[in-house]
Image: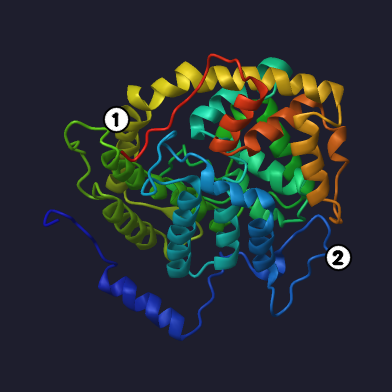
């Protein structure tokens, strides 16, 4: 790998960071533990063994839906290959990258970790392709839109009712790894749950609202850019392992690098170099241009590749359509023997029976919302098994690409 290119922090900045650490300098732009806001402030109070945002981290990790990260597609579906990323590994990469940036900028690492670990918990099976078709079906029936970042908040705040902090939920809903920006300036005006709830609701009804989300903390900005950094190079790495390319692509990046390790290292260094001591995140012009170009190249070579889309279009999308209609019928009937009731509604009610901050009974949700929740919660394998159970005679079947 003689052609790899790694940069380091300038000596002057490295010395400044080390001196600030020795002097215990506090970053005035970091979110302080004492500023935490919860729906129920009398519950989940911080203590020595469980500080404010550590509680959010542990709540997220102990929500049963957290387990399902391990069998949800990151980019490549229907492949039996333990070396290919699943969403669980992506979430860990985001957390690690964000903590590295946050540590250098002297931000709140517990808050960063909570946002990173929870940011994709509402993601559908089969990655963004699954998200697109579920949103289409949900919109056709309700006029509302499904977005995985909004649904991650719904899972943690409305379904599982975890009493998470406003700061954590805001970082999750605003993570939007599909939108890169040269500067990330936090919006400090979101200070109440009423404002947050109105922002969240607008994302269901206005397709433009999702593009205007901006985190209210610098920590949220770190997680947002880290989401992009985490997948650009890793998706390239996975694509090459799967033999997606006949020849190794000639990527155009010179500054940020082209490999996963280069991109992570060089983007972290450049962001810290341009952001230290400032109330916002920033990267150099050429780094931002190359990051944008790298994402476009990934879309043209990987995400839009016919081989990655063929199986989804042929079988999985029709399976989504069949399943949505069948589950919607079950939701309308609320038969206690139905799959929806036994494996979803009862499941939710069981895991929330002891929560203190419940907004409403889960079964009082609309049928479409229950179907949306259930389908979004599924892992890839669960989805395939349930479809086979519901439609044993369906012409739509999928086969995994095996090791041999």
Q: Is residue 92 visible?
A: yes
Q: Which residue is mark 2?
A: 42
User: Is 282 on the left or on the right of 149, as rendered?
Assistant: left
Quarter the N terminus occupies: bottom left
Q: Mark 1: which secondary structure?
A: helix
User: Is 211 on the left or on the right of 302, as rendered?
Assistant: right
- Within 10 angstroms of label 2, few (less than 14), some, or many (20 or more) residues? few
Residue 365 location (% of width, % of height): 83, 32
Q: Which residue is mark 1?
A: 301
Q: Residue at x 72, y 44 (%)?
A: 196
User: Is 51 on the left or on the right of 98, as rendered?
Assistant: right
> Is residue 392 positioned above or below 75 on the image?
above
- Within 10 angstroms of label 1, few (less than 14), some, or many (20 or more) residues? some
Q: Residue at x 52, y 17 (%)?
A: 396
Quarter the C terminus occupies: top left
Residue 153 location (% of width, % of height): 68, 44
> Is residue 393 positioned above or below 353 on the image?
above
Residue 36 location (% of width, % of height): 71, 63
Between 295 and 133, the one lying in front of the other is: 133
Q: Choose top left, top right, bottom left or bottom right for residue 383.
A: top right
Between 50 and 322, the one lying in front of the other is: 322
Q: Is residue 171 visible?
A: no
Residue 282 location (% of width, % of height): 41, 53
Between 38 and 304, the one lying in front of the other is: 304
């Amino acid at each position: 790998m003689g052609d790899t290119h790694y940069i380091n922090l300038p000596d002057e900045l490295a010395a400044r960071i080390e001196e600030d650490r020795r002097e215990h300098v506090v970053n005035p732009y970091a979110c302080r533990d004492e500023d935490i806001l919860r729906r129920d402030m009398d519950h989940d109070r911080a203590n020595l063994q469980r500080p404010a945002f550590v509680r959010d981290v542990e709540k997220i990790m102990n929500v049963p839906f957290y387990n399902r990260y391990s069998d949800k597609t990151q980019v490549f579906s229907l492949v039996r290959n333990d070396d290919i990323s699943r969403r669980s590994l992506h979430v860990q990469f985001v957390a690690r990258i964000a903590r590295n940036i946050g540590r250098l900028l002297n931000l709140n690492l517990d808050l960063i970790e909570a946002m990173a670990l929870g940011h994709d918990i509402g993601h559908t099976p089969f990655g963004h392709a699954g998200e697109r078709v579920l949103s289409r079906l949900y919109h056709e029936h309700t006029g509302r839109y499904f977005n995985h970042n909004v649904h991650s908040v719904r899972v943690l705040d409305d379904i599982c009712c975890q009493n998470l902090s406003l700061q954590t939920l805001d970082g999750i809903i605003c993570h939007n790894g599909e939108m890169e920006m040269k500067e990330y300036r936090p919006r400090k005006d979101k200070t109440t749950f009423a404002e947050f709830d109105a922002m969240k609701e607008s994302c269901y009804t206005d397709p433009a609202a999702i593009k205007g989300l901006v985190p209210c903390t610098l920590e949220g900005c770190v997680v947002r850019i880290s989401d992009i950094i985490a997948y650009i190079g890793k998706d390239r790495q996975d694509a090459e392992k799967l033999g997606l390319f006949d020849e190794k692509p000639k990527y155009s990046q010179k500054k940020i690098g082209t490999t996963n390790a280069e991109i992570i290292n060089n983007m972290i260094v450049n962001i810290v170099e341009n952001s230290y001591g400032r109330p916002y995140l920033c990267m150099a012009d050429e780094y931002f241009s190359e990051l944008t170009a790298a994402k476009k190249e990934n879309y043209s070579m990987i995400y839009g590749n016919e081989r990655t889309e063929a199986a989804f279009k042929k079988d999985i999308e029709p399976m989504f359509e069949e399943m949505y209609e069948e589950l919607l019928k079950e939701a309308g009937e609320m038969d206690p023997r139905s799959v929806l009731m036994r494996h979803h509604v009862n499941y939710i009610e069981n895991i929330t029976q002891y929560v203190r901050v419940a907004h409403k009974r889960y079964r009082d949700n609309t049928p479409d919302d229950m179907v949306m929740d259930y389908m979004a919660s599924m892992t890839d394998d669960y989805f395939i098994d349930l479809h086979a159970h519901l439609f044993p005679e369906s012409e739509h079947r999928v086969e995994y690409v095996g090791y041999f």
